[in-house]
């Protein structure tokens, strides 16, 4: 991808910043998540269309004498603040690449649900790369940041870029989907608790071995054609997720959530990534609001939020 930084952003990035650097990063959904065979490195070959939506985490970076992290919001009580945290790993990875000391005071405000299938951890890693790059004045291109990002997690490069993009390999090879700008309106049904992504892949392998998984999605062409048509009904019919069967086995209650979304008038709905979040496509913003209220009243999720997409990836605000 060859996307330039904004001129003001670029100037700040090259100078380094003395004051706080605030970065906003979106959640992702997969409009198409095709899962291929298990590779020898333990990952599955993926064929996916990523889409960034307007649910955001915010990371603030300030100058410090060491590297420290504090957090507030969605599920942060469950996260360690040590080297296992993706934010800390991202800061170390960037410092190592750029040959600078990894000194910063980082604070995360989290709104993306934890282990929800919305790539919240990957989003935070992407935010940390962009925030520290600006704070330290390391001035890397988005392509260089995406290269570091790929080692941190398969979804991290996409969250540097945002928008709507094709993901191949294990998901880390990202290229933009060229479509005329359209805003899609989503309802995001957040469940209680999370699901483990590795466990969802293992469950899919088990279902496939037992011959009880649905047929694989196959080609991505239908989804890409649907995006070009800019008609939410067409896009809704093209949504697909090979991990959905596994998520439904692990969390059978999601079947009722999907059904309730349909009954509320959503044009289509799928489990997001490895779940348990479900996302529904609405005809317009007003419809999305109405469906969200109905889903909450039906008590089939912890919370229903409206969101739109595509939005930009990790950006200094
Ligand atoms: P994905 O869809 O990318 O597989 P997910 O959306 O299901 O992931 P995440 O919220 O990214 O789930 O969390 C996955 C795991 O990553 C968490 O259970 C946690 O152990 C780990 N993790 C490490 N650092 C973070 C972070 N800063 N935020 C969220 N999770 C983190």
Image: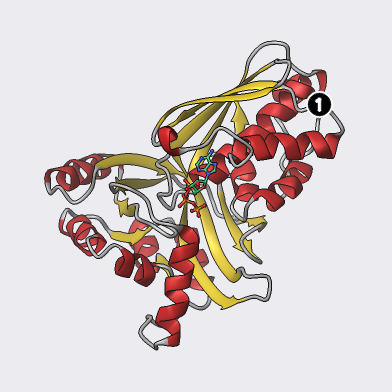
Q: Is residue 317 visible?
A: no
Badge 1 marks a residue whose secondary structure is loop
> On the rendered structure, is 96 left or right of 230?
right
Query: Which residue occupies 69% across, 47% down?
Result: 149
Which of the image's four quarters has the C terminus? top right
Q: Is residue 15 above or below residue 173?
A: above
Q: Residue 275 at what x, y percent from top left?
A: 38, 57
Between 55 and 203, the residue placed more toward the observer is: 203
> On the rendered structure, is 110 left or right of 233?
right
Query: Which residue occupies 45% across, 64% down?
Result: 199
> On the rendered structure, is 199 left or right of 271?
right
Q: Is residue 183 above or below residue 9?
A: below
Query: What residue occupies the far top of the structure in this picture?
Result: 19
Between 43 and 310, the residue placed more toward the observer is: 43
Between 175 and 255, the residue placed more toward the observer is: 255
User: Which residue has dot 1 on it?
Assistant: 101
Query: What residue occupies the far left of the structure in this picture?
Result: 297
Q: Residue 104 at what x, y percent from top left?
A: 69, 21
Query: Which residue occupies 68% across, 32% down?
Result: 130
Query: Which residue occupies 39% across, 34% down?
Result: 74
Q: Residue 209 at what x, y percent from top left?
A: 45, 86
Q: Is residue 36 visible?
A: yes
Visual colour scheme: secondary structure
Instruction: Give the quarter of the image for residue 230.
Output: bottom left
Specify few, some or many for label 1: CA neighbours under 10 Å numbering under 14, 14-19, or 20 or more.
Answer: some
């Amino acid at each position: 991808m060859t996307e330039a930084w904004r001129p003001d952003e670029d100037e700040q990035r090259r100078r380094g910043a003395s004051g706080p650097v605030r970065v906003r990063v979106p959640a992702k959904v997969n409009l198409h998540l095709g899962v291929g065979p298990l590779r020898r490195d333990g990952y599955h070959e993926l064929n996916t269309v990523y889409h960034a939506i307007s649910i955001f985490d915010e990371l603030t970076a300030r100058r410090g004498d060491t590297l420290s992290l504090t957090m507030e919001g969605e599920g942060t009580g469950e996260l360690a603040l040590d080297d296992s945290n993706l934010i800390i790993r991202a800061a170390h990875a960037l410092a190592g690449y750029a040959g600078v000391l990894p000194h910063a005071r980082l604070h995360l405000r989290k709104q993306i649900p934890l282990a929800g299938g919305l790539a919240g951890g990957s989003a935070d890693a992407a935010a940390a790369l962009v925030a520290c790059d600006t704070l330290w004045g390391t001035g890397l291109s988005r392509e260089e940041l995406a290269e570091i990002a790929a080692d941190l997690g398969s979804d991290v490069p996409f969250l540097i870029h945002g928008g709507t993009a094709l993901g191949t390999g294990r998901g880390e090879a990202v290229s933009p989907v060229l479509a005329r700008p359209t805003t899609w309106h989503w309802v995001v049904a957040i469940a209680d608790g999370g699901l483990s992504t590795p466990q969802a892949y293992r469950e899919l392998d088990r279902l496939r071995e037992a011959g009880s998984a649905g047929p694989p999605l196959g080609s991505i062409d239908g989804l890409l054609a649907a995006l070009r048509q800019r008609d939410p009904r067409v896009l809704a019919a093209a949504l697909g997720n090979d991990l959905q069967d596994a998520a439904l086995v692990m969390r059978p209650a999601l079947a009722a959530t999907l059904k309730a979304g349909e009954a509320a008038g959503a044009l289509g709905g799928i489990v997001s990534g490895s779940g348990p979040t479900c996302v529904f496509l609405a005809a317009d913003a007003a419809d999305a609001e109405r469906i969200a209220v109905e889903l909450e009243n039906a008590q089939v999720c912890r919370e229903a939020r409206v969101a739109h997409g595509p939005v930009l990836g990790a950006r200094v605000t």
